[in-house]
Image: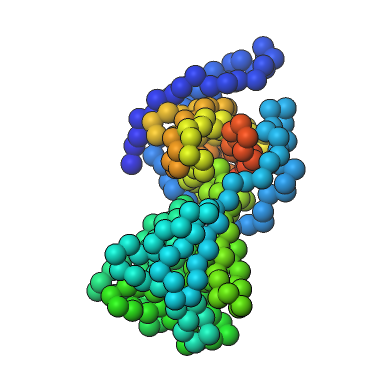
Amino acid sequence: MTRVRRYVTCFWEEVPPTKTSARLFAIGLALVQFVLAVAPCTAQVALQPSLLTSGENAQPQVHAPTVTILLWVDSPTMMVDGVRQAIDPGRDTKPIIRNGRTLVPARAIIEELGGVVSWQEEDRKVSIARADIAIDLWIGEGTTSVNGVSTPVDPTNPQVVPEIVNGRTMLPLRFVAENLGATVTWNQRTREIGIVFEQHLMRNSNRSITLTVGKNETATCRVYVYNPLTTSIVVKATLQAPQLPRGWMAEFCCGDACCFKSMDIALTAREQKCIELSVQARGGGEGNVSLFVGSEGLESEGINVHVISKGAGDG
């Protein structure tokens, strides 16, 4: 499909006069509407921590905010960051033990972790989505799908399956929480379950990805930025593209605002926005771009994208 982009004033570094014409040429290319070929993202290795804070304007390193949830078996309440609340208001739903594993009412807990839950009655399927993580579970089935990959709920105990109890969907807590990136603890004496979840500015689970496109196509990947605080913040997103072949162009867009270098993105409390990172290839070759996000008082984070373009004559 085609899209119309609105280019905002970017924050540029100083460049030698000899590079001016090349930069103006790149800007001119960006103003032309082109067809986006969205390539699938595949996980590679994680970025080195030093890459996330490199550069003159890097934010000081601080710990990411966390959400801490405490639940108790056979108790209808939970504690979220020290505040007690009902797990399932008006229904008195409680965590239970089945086949040696804890099952919990799904929706309230997953939403506290920033996920979205949906139910498909025909297939008796529960779908959980959070940024670039998608989990599908089926009632009574010991096999799930995590980002399209078939995955057992519990490799050591095939009897552990999602259930419906008193009209409420009960999911295996550890499997769901850990696949969403949380840490789960269990206190046998008090029968207490602890869930600790770090809230990051960048919600993507994969921080180094590879995109493959054809000649003269555009590789595109979505990056999710999130405000974990209860106050509004401004996130500075910065694009670095030092290793692209001649003639290639990289940019990023948030909504209808696009930029080649650095742009401020306003986020209200607990708000998430999607950045579309694009690399337009010219012929065959490969290259790397990185996108960094940071905000005052929060840990800076980044994602690296390796783009491979199969040009004329490539297999």
The residue positioned farthest toward the top in the image shown: 17
Tell me the quadrant of the picture where the N terminus can be found: top left
> Image check: 10 left or right of 110?
right
Residue 25: x and y in percent read 53, 21
Viewer-side residue, 287 vs 227? 227
Position of residue 230 measured from the top left corner of the image (x, y, whole percent): 48, 39
Quadrant in the rendering for residue 205: bottom right
Q: Which residue is drawn at 44% across and 76% down?
A: 74
Q: Tell me, yes or no, if residue 191 can be seen here.
A: yes
Identify the coloring: rainbow
Residue at 67% across / 16% down in the picture? 14
Q: So how many labels did they put on this image?
A: 0
Give the percent coordinates (x, y) of residue 248: 57, 34
Give the residue displayed 61% in from the left and 69% down from the top: 185
Residue beneath the point at 40% across and 69% down: 76
Give how far across and how far down residue 89 sits, in percent: 32, 62
Q: Of 28 and 142, which appears nearest the observer?
A: 142
Establish if 239 lies above or below 19.
Answer: below
In which quarter of the view is residue 242 placed?
Answer: top right
| As drawn, 96 above or below 299 | below
On the rendered image, what quadrant is the C terminus found in? Answer: bottom right
Q: Is residue 2 left or right of residue 130?
A: left
Is there any visible trace of residue 113 in the rendered image?
no
Q: Which residue is situated farthest in the left direction here?
A: 122
Residue in the foreground of this view, choosing between 118 and 206: 118
Quadrant of the rendered structure where residue 110 is? Answer: bottom left
Give whichever of 191, 105 is nearer the camera: 191
